[in-house]
Amino acid sequence: MLDRFASYAARLCLTAEGIARRGASIDRQRRVVQSVWPKAFCYPIGSYPTKTSLKNSDVDLLVSIPGQSEERKSLIRAATAMKEAVIGKCIAKPYNCTVIEGARVPILTYMDENEVPPLKFDISFQKENAVRNTSYLIEKFDERPFMRDLVIVIKHWYGLREKQLNEVYRGGLGSYAVALTVIGFFNVQRRKLDEKQYHAFITGSTYDMFVEYLEFWTKWKYKEYTMIPDPGEILTKKKRGKKGLGFMLRIMDPTDPENDVGRASHKVSRVFTAMVKLKGKIRRFGPDMNMGQLDYFLSATPAERKLFLKEKADQDRNNMKLHLKLQMRIRKAENKTSKAAQRSLTMMLEKQEEFLARRPTFAAQVAKAEHLLKDSDSPEQDLVSERGLNHDMPTIVPDKEEMQPQAAPEFDAATLENSEELVLLDDDEEEVKSPEQEKMEREAKHAATIAKKREKRQKLFQRRRERKEKTKEMKVQKRIKEAEKKELKKQEESAKMALKAGKKAKTREKEARNGWELELYR
């Protein structure tokens, strides 16, 4: 039987052309590093040397400088020097080159513009721990090559399903942690099964391995267990001797037992919640599903992709609002000369730097907008308009084609037999529009939004009037019922009093008759 999961993983891998492009680009970065620090070493780390890169994966490099201090300020200075060299060698544009100071280890991220399409690089300056990690993964994957297919499929699903959590500094699960979850899973199976069962398991289909992997991690007790990937040991809280940290994945680094790889992945619960749903879908269709169905399950569905793009656009819009408000306050403070104003200006500038450092993607967009504004000959525009946003400034919005809902693939018999084509997401470039067209579109969209809000407000007022009339009518009906109830109660009391008076009259008449008979008897 054809192993469709293995074929799917092969289609996700880098082609020979992609490997050659990355190799040439890495040599180019090495020359830049040597121009700044002649005695420095530049090592490729991560998914590229371990052969688990996807077609859209970035390249991770580690720069080791002899005599480099491990202090954070020193690492930031090294990243800044590398940034200036990359821009000076015309490898990256200033707006696509950012130093992420908020990460656990400062990282320089930029796009190599000499490649088509541009290739993203993440460069770190630290000890050679990452080199040992990469060597460890290469050794384990060479021993059991079938683990590479599983890592590639998981990274593809994870990268598309949880786009906001594919970075460790955002609380997500990094590539190294994903690889350790796979290695730990297979080592646990090797300890649990006998030799024949384990051999049958690893020589079986990738589908069975993937389903068992999902089954294993969806039943993981996060408050109790700690994974030791090599040799595949699971420690409980009693053996570990430490208090549980709640819903957090704890995986010990095989190259550094003191390092918990999952300690920063505080949002990993979203990934394992999606694993439960994915396991049910894949089991329902079985191992004979075609490539189109695999891509539909392992990639983001149209509705999820649309929701992600909408959330991202809203977040970028909010970031732009906050940035422009802060920039306007800075401009006002610059025009004042008092000491208090200067202290306030210093604090706001520090706040702005921190704001951009925590949002590297948004910082790149802002830098690009400022770069385009400086290159143009037109005078600088006011950044803040009546609505708080500049209509001439490019905003970060999703592609219109991406926002359109797409039809899900049909899983009929003909598709199951004939469909072998991998359905990939559309990555076409966005159509370039003139500033006038963008301004007209924004104004038209704003007018439509205002009309929609006005209509919504009118409907709200109409519903309020209807509720008031209904409440008033209910009060009138209530008063009428209370009046009728009082009248009925009054009539009942009158009837009771009349009955009581009649009884008293009969009693007096009886007493009078008895008295007359007594007198007559005497």
Image (cartoon, helix red, strand yellow):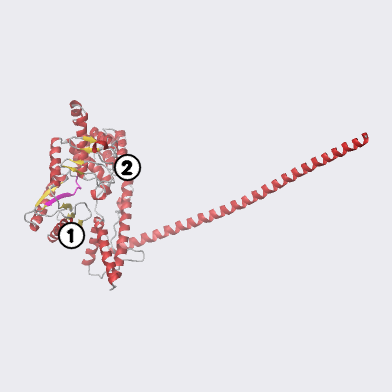
Confirm whether residue 204 shows in the render.
no
Q: Which residues are magenta?
A: 54-63
Task: Please tell me how crowded label 1 is: few (under 14), some (14-19), or many (20+) other residues with Cα within 10 Å.
Answer: some
Three-letter residue code for mark 2: Ala
Q: Secondary structure at mark 1?
A: loop
Q: Is residue 438 above or below residue 212?
A: below
Quadrant (top left/top right/bottom left/bottom right) for the C terminus: top right
Side of 297 where 521 appears, left or right:
right
Q: Is residue 148 above or below residue 121?
A: above
Task: Please tell me how crowded label 2 is: few (under 14), some (14-19), or many (20+) other residues with Cα within 10 Å.
Answer: few
Residue 394 percent coordinates (x, y): 28, 61
- Disc assigned to residue 93: 1
The residues bearing labels 2 and 1 have C-alpha atoms spaced at a distance of 39 Å
Confirm whether residue 457 shows in the render.
yes
Side of 92 where 226 appears, left or right:
right
What residue do we see at 32% from left, 58% from top?
318
Three-letter residue code for mark 1: Lys
Q: Residue furthest front?
A: 522
Nearer-the-camera pick, 473 or 336:
336
Quadrant (top left/top right/bottom left/bottom right) for the N terminus: top left
